[in-house]
């Protein structure tokens, strides 16, 4: 972390408060996330950072410079993070500048609004001291037999000032690709090789045809990515599927759709808290397809420095209800606040802060990356 940038990016009048916030956040993360080590483990996470770099932030104003430091501090605690909702790259580059030269990243191009996307990128961020990219990446494109069903009515919509394409089909079912194309790549950390795919699944609505489309997207990505399992195992790779699946609950049919293709949720992750701000939805998930025994480490229990999985409560120390007065002037200056009375402002602040930090909590898992002892033992027992 390049903390010296605080001198250039944060005004003198705010710096004492921002530094105090960072100290509180660091202390929280020390308790909630295991420390990074040189080789034995891999701390892997997924995080949807709300509207990062989006030009029109729905009337909630621009992100403040201090928010970049808070986001970077959280990201820095992991070795590898799949990030959703990276739009234009200016804000993202500020965050990676704060993280420093040991970090690298790879991202997709923006999703075209004409096919139902919202102009976002799917992104992998990794600490090069621990993780290296194995030079292969690509977006998942479905064959005709796996296209996703959608009931289409012609309409025009606008996204970031750009008019989306009209569809000349009225009330008929058509086949289409993902609204936001999943992104797969190969990485390695120490002895652990993994093929990873991140998603931001279409939400739509809580019922009807749009919910069916969401479930079908989840099924398709599981089926299509899961078909790589045998080839991956032959190359000693694990498959990891993660991101924002818009899963309602662990008992909901959205979760059932994710697990149908043979992916597993390790026991350590089954106990992880909900990841939305309201703490009642399990939108974000990390699931695996591995050879027998590869997830045994995650079946163990641990807490604190020995925890195997968890999430970060991003508003536990920052942008709390008690800190409203610190941000009152910025909140009241946003266009959405124009017609709100004094009694409405506190609730509005709690929505505003999600555009500063996020409306999702990071979900993380700790994986065993060093198999050198097993390899050495195998050399002794191997047949000549």
Image (tube, rainbow, N blue to C red):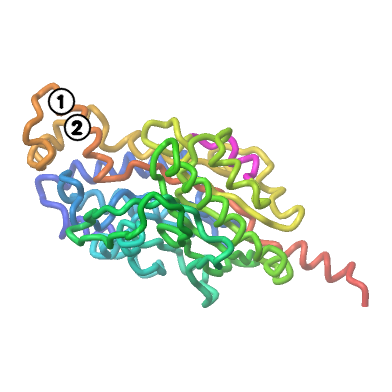
**Badge 2 vs badge 1, beta-carbon distance below 8 Å:** yes
Residue 308 position in % (x across, y down): 59, 44
**Of the pair 347 and 74, the residue shown nearer to us:** 347
Q: Which mark is residue 325?
A: none
For residue 313, above or below residue 172: above
Q: The C terminus lies in which quarter of the figure? A: bottom right
Using residue 279 as the reference point, say whether residue 352 is left or right of it: left
Q: Secondary structure at mark 1?
A: helix
Residue drawn where x is 74% and y is 58% of the image:
291
Mark 1: few/some/many CA within 10 Å (<14, 14-19, 20+): few
Q: Which residue is mark 2?
A: 348
Q: CA distance from mark 2 to mark 1?
A: 6 Å
Q: Residue furthest right?
A: 384
Does residue 61 appear anywhere in the picture?
A: yes
Residue drawn where x is 44% and y is 36% of the image:
207
- Place residue 40 in its image quadrant: bottom right
In the rendered structure, does residue 210 fall within the stretch colored magenta?
Answer: no
Residue drawn where x is 55% and y is 67% of the image:
143
Please give the range of residues in magenta: 265-273
Using residue 240 as the reference point, say whether residue 52 is left or right of it: left
Residue 81 position in % (x across, y down): 45, 57
Q: Secondary structure at mark 2?
A: helix
The number of numbered discs placed on residues in the rendered structure image is 2
Mark 2: few/some/many CA within 10 Å (<14, 14-19, 20+): some
Q: Which residue is mark 1?
A: 344
Residue 100 position in % (x across, y down): 34, 65
Using residue 227 as the reference point, say whether residue 217 is left or right of it: left
Q: The N terminus lies in which quarter of the figure? A: bottom left
For residue 279, above or below residue 212: above
Q: Residue furthest top?
A: 343
Using residue 301 as the reference point, say whether residue 214 is left or right of it: left
């Amino acid at each position: 972390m390049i903390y010296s940038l605080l001198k250039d990016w944060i005004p003198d009048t705010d710096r004492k408060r921002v530094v105090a916030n960072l100290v509180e956040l660091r202390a929280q993360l020390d308790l909630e996330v295991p420390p990074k080590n040189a080789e034995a483990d891999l701390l892997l996470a997924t995080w949807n950072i709300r509207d990062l770099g989006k030009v029109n932030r729905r009337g909630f104003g621009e992100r403040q410079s201090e928010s970049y430091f808070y986001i970077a501090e959280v990201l820095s605690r992991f070795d590898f993070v799949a990030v959703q909702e990276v739009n234009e790259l200016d804000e993202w580059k500020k965050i990676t500048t704060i993280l420093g030269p040991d970090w690298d990243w790879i991202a997709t191009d923006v999703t075209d609004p004409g096919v139902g996307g919202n102009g976002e990128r799917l992104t992998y961020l990794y600490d090069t001291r621990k993780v290296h990219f194995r030079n292969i990446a690509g977006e998942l494109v479905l064959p005709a037999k796996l296209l996703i069903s959608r009931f289409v009515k012609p309409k025009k919509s606008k996204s970031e000032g750009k008019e989306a394409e009209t569809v000349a089909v009225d009330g008929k079912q058509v086949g289409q690709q993902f609204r936001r194309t999943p992104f797969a790549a190969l990485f390695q950390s120490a002895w652990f090789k993994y093929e990873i795919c991140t998603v931001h699944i279409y939400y739509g609505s809580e019922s009807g045809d749009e919910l069916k489309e969401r479930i079908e997207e989840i099924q398709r990505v599981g089926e299509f990515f899961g078909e790589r399992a045998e080839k991956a195992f032959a190359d000693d790779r694990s498959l990891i599927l993660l991101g924002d699946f818009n899963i309602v609950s662990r008992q909901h049919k959205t979760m059932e759709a994710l697990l149908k293709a043979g992916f597993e949720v390790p026991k350590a992750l089954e106990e992880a808290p909900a990841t939305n701000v309201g703490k009642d939805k399990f939108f974000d998930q990390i699931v695996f397809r591995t050879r027998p025994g590869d997830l045994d480490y995650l079946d163990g229990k641990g807490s604190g420095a020995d925890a195997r999985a968890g999430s970060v409560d991003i508003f536990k120390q920052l942008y709390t209800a008690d800190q409203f007065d610190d941000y009152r002037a910025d909140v009241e200056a946003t266009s959405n606040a124009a017609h709100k009375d004094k009694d409405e402002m506190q609730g509005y602040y709690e929505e505003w802060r999600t555009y500063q930090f996020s409306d999702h909590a990071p979900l993380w898992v700790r994986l065993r990356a060093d198999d050198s002892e097993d390899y050495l033992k195998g050399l002794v027992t191997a047949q000549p």
